[in-house]
């Protein structure tokens, strides 16, 4: 075997200073993700405040009851004087809303950092999110659009519970906004699917 026929290993050439500097600029996004982590802490604090008030109101604490009723009060509607099923449902929906927004923050923080800043190397971690193994900008957009639809659904349900407090124009507007979110998510998912099929079509064309 001739020595010239041996496969030679390719060595990565060093990046020139300007491209290296431009590539390092991705770390400017790190303070943004750290800021979102602080916003996550605020949501956790708000969640526990609302939950403690709800438990206190259920146990008969007058101050907690007042805070809970003020949190779900709607302008122009008489505020109930005691905890009832509708009030509990509105508070619980508010808690679910906080959780869904928190999930959205996690998707942006973890997925955005993994996609645009640096790899986390979580392949062998037992708690690695299933969607993170194949995350990219397109998958992240679809996940975010789905999460926004869920948040919009919670807000729309809260409005329908107190439908008598709103006029028909407001109800139609909120329903229309939710439908727009839904159609937008479907359009993003469809575009992502079409873009994902392009390499396969190109491969088949080359083979033929």
Image: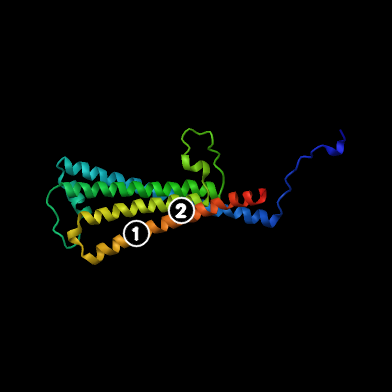
Tell me where residue 8 appears, x and y as whole percent: 79, 40
The residue at the point 54 percent across, 36 percent down is 123
Q: Sequence order check: which comes first, mark 1 or mark 2?
A: 1
Q: In this view, does 200 lie to the left or right of 99?
A: right
Q: Mark 1 points at which residue?
A: 179
Q: Are marks 1 and 2 in contact (CB under 8 Å)?
A: no
Percent across and percent down for residue 87 are 18, 49
Which coloring applies here? rainbow
Q: Where is residue 181 in the image (x, y as percent from the top left)?
A: 38, 58
Residue 63 visible in rendering: no
Tell me the quarter of the picture where residue 159 sits. Answer: bottom left
Query: How many residues crowd around disc 1 within 10 Å: few (fewer than 14), some, or many (20 or more)?
Result: some
Q: How many labels does the image show?
A: 2
Element under label 2?
Answer: helix
Work out whether 5 lies above or below 162. Answer: above
Q: Quadrant of the N terminus?
A: top right
| Disc 2 target residue | 189
């Amino acid at each position: 075997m001739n020595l010239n026929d041996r496969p030679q290993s390719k060595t990565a050439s060093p990046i020139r200073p300007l491209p290296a500097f431009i590539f390092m600029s991705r770390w400017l996004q790190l303070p943004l993700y750290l800021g979102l982590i602080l916003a996550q802490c605020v949501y956790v604090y708000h969640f526990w405040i609302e939950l403690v008030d709800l438990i206190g109101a259920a146990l008969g604490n007058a101050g907690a009851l007042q805070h809970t009723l003020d949190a779900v009060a709607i302008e122009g509607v008489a505020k109930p004087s005691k905890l009832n099923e509708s009030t509990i449902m509105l508070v619980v929906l508010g808690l679910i809303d906080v959780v869904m927004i928190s999930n959205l923050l996690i998707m942006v923080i973890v997925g955005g950092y993994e996609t645009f800043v640096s790899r986390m190397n979580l392949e062998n971690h037992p708690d690695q999110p299933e969607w993170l193994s194949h995350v990219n900008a397109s998958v992240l957009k679809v996940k975010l659009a789905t999460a926004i639809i869920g948040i919009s659904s919670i807000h729309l349900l809260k409005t329908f519970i107190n439908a008598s407090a709103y006029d028909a124009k407001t109800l139609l507007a909120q329903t229309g906004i939710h439908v727009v979110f839904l159609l937008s998510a479907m359009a993003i998912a469809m575009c992502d699917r079409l873009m994902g099929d392009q390499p396969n079509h190109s491969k088949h064309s080359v083979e033929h």
